[in-house]
Amino acid sequence: MEGLTKIYGAGVSAVQALRGVDLEIRSGELIVLLGPSGSGKSTILNILGGLDEPTAGHVWFEGQDLTALDGSALTEYRRQHVGFVFQFYNLVASLTARENVALITDIADDAMMPQEALAMVGLTDRLDHFPAQLSGGEQQRVAIARAIAKRPRVLFCDEPTGALDSQTGIMVLEAIQRINRELGTTTLIITHNAVIAGIADVVWQFADGMLAQSTRNPVRVAASELRW
Amino acid sequence: MTIAMRLGWLPVLDRKLLRELWRLRGPALAIALVIAAGVGMVMMSVGMMRSLEATRDAYYDRYRFADVFAPAKRVPVALLPELAHLPGVRTSEGRITMSALIDLPYVFDPINARLHSLPAKGRPHINDLVLRAGRWPDPARPDELLANEAFLKAAKLGLGDEITVILNGKRRAFRIVGAVLSPEYVYAIPPGQIFPDNARFGVLWLHEEVLAGAFDLRQAFNELLVRVDPGTNVVDVIRRIDDRLQPFGGIGGYARDQQISDRFVTNELNELRNMTRILPPVFLLVAAFLTHLVLSRLIDTEREVIGLLKAFGFRNRVIIGHYLKLAILLSLGGLILGATLGIWLGRGLARLYQQFFVFPFLQFHVDADLFLMALLAALFPVLTGCFIAIRRAAALTPAEAMSPPLPTNYGGRLTGALTQFRSLDQLTRIILRGLARRPVRTLLTAIGIGAALALYIASASSRDNVEEMIRITFNQAEREDLLVTFTEPRGRDALTALARLPGIRRVEPVRAVSVVLTHQGISRREAITATDTGADLSRLIDIDGTVIEPPKQGLVLSASLARQLRVGRGDAVEIEVTQGRRPRWQSHVVAVVESAIGSPAYMRLDELDRRMMEGPRISGAFLAIDTDARTAILKALRETPAIAGISEVEASRRALRNTIAETMGIITLFNTGFAGLIVFGVIYNHARVALAERARDLASLRVLGFRTTEVAYLLIGELMLLTLIALPLGIAMGIGLAHYIVSAFGGDLFTIPYALSIGTMARAVLVVMAAAGATAYLVSRRLGQLDLVAVLKTRD
């Protein structure tokens, strides 16, 4: 990321969400992005995920400038390289766990089998259940399986534990950590919850649209050891 | 900002209402269009019908159209005072009425004419004329006459032109000084026919002494016209008149409803009323149903806001009131649009029909009851539909609405079954499960689209039906080229004489006699048509195309006449001939035939000859001719004094097309237009609501890397699937509705067969597909505007 700036609106009502952010993410790293509401962390994720365009600056992904891509090229970027995990899971209610994952594996080039992805998040026995028949944690794990089944280069998780209790949240984080370790997927987690920072290689602290602090953890804590 | 400030004086909820309305302007417009189509259709049709009927009545009244017509051979003028004093007679007038041929130097086709005398002084007291152009004939100029406007236009004749009329075999030149309309000739129908043919049939009004001189009727008349006192039994008056006229060759009086022009007008108005009585309420019903469907789904998507309002402490009553207001505002647009459009189109249509019927003026007024009826009919389903949906939403506790909603459970038997089909792609699976999860709604939506399709089919079917009627009539029933009628019944040797003309391929005899048919006190004045067995040119064809041979003995009746006389097969009917020796006899009804167009009563010529006690006599002949010889044959026929009328079947076919086909054509055009509007409204509404309901799923898929086209498939695929379900439903309903409309119309002069064509159904399907295609295009354009960022943060 070079000089990433984002301004919403214009004139007196303009809001500067990002004020020139320069950052680099190494392949395979797990990054946790902390910060209060309005600090710009979601804006970063939206731009990196190809959902939004910066007002100024560039985003380089494996030598390609994302800011130079048009809408359909961004769709292709998301389709081939990006996995998303949402706070509210966003599963398709009318598809079973297996089918929700198949939704993505059907359109990706080098995808796993749906059951393989679901096995990675520990859901082998819930393959043919509909979202309504799964708990919140199980739904989020299906969402993670859906996100990683296509073996994405990067995985973006927006408040993945935000709607879950701590015990379930830890199970979800375990799954994310395992994917990062076993598949080498570069992972970016946005959260309000500072405890989660322990599982990261790098922790970015955002405030007022700028990077306030960047810390490299000497040791990564296993998700199972987190408590909140 | 500025809008918010301007709305400052309104309560907050009402401000929300107005902004909501603005946000929903797309669906609101579609809802308004559907309601407008339903309401507009009712207003248009009923307004037009009332207007045409009021116009006809006012026309008849203002120009003193006769209540009773009593033809005779020769009645002395001296009898008039006595006739005028018969009980029930308000006014009476004698006139001379005759048939003749018109000879125009540049028109070769035979032109039949009906001649009426004008009173020596002043205008007719009964059957007054509307002078459209020119002037009344000068009493001092015996060669001046008036002609009906339609004939002058069709024959391209102008005021001041000279025409030759063959009066009782003598050629005589006249000058046209005025073009007129008459309540008696709203439709000018040649004798022996049932369709107007203005180019070949003219009505002329001449000085009394000219006709009296030509037909030896000095100090006499041969037709009595009567207007009866209000509330008088017309049948009694006719009986009294018949008694008085019988010694003078009276052949039986008849009431206005038996007069051919009035019968035709009534028939046409009935046909129109039939089309406007059945279809518009169905339109309104369908529109209401669709509005109900769309509004309740729209309110379902507002569930969250309703929960929020409750959490803020708004009372249920206030919330329900708020959404009812929204619904009323949404439908009000349609109501106003529909009413305005309907009144405007109704007036336009009435004006069109005014020209078609040639009424001299038009009475158009919109009655308040009509407006009120449409208002209630449209509002009722809107309000009930919304009320149910809002109550459902308001029944939630605020907490339920504020907490993350549980995903809909798709674990049902029907939806779960799909899990086994592994080869199905996931998007199709989403579509199928979505439809299967709510089978009632799926079915209702399909029925809605189907109903719109059915309306289109039923509206368009009338054109097929008329075409079929024309086909049956002219390809199967009337296959002759010419029909000649004699001045007097003649012996069979006339046939031989005709057959001897060069170029005649076939000659078949026909005899028509005027009769009064009576059954259990009900009498009808009709003509019996009699032919030989094995006739090939003019045949009686029933509505399914079966040839009906005249029976050896007894009578065949048309279904409409049988209905009027309340007779069925096997019943005996009293027959009284009103000409010649006036024989009477009883005859059994051997068959009742539902025929498109055809004589209402039919029997065998040899039996009629026996009954008439005049020996073998015929009144005319059907001729099949070589086309090359047409000119020579017509010339020869015209020079034969015994021939009173010549009609060409091709001209009748054209005339039929120009009258019925045109009457139906106008209204059909409007009906199909409205149906098309509903088709589009339904499909568009459905797609818009589906888009609103699925917005989150669709945006999630876009974030996950699905292309716009793939996401569009979810919506469009569902739409197409629903449309596919709707097609057979709609076709079935359309066929049913088309059948019902045909069966509901019992015409007096003709019966319309049911003949919905594959072409019409295909066209209807195409209209639906086009509407679906246009909707798909409009909706996929909106998919580009989905907010992808929002779905990351929001729950449902």
Image: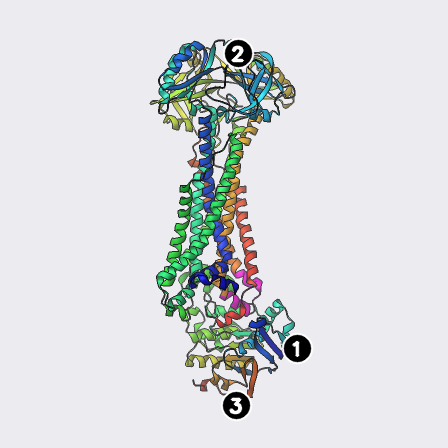
Q: Which residue is mark 2?
A: B209
Q: Chain of mark 2?
A: B
Q: Which mark is residue A63?
A: 1
Tell me if residue B676 comes above or below residue A68 in the rendering. above
Mark 2 closeness class: few <14, some 14–19, many ≥20 residues within 10 Å: some
Residue A179 percent location from the top left of the image? 52, 80
Q: Nearer the viewer, residue A140 or A15?
A: A15
Q: Which residue is mark 3?
A: A219
Can I make out residue B543 in this image?
Answer: no
> Which amino acid, mark 1?
Gly
Q: Secondary structure at mark 1?
A: loop
Can I make out residue B129 in this image?
Answer: yes
Q: Residue furthest bottom?
A: A218
> Which amino acid, mark 2?
Glu
Q: Find out whether residue B701 is within the magenta segment.
A: yes
Q: Secondary structure at mark 2?
A: helix
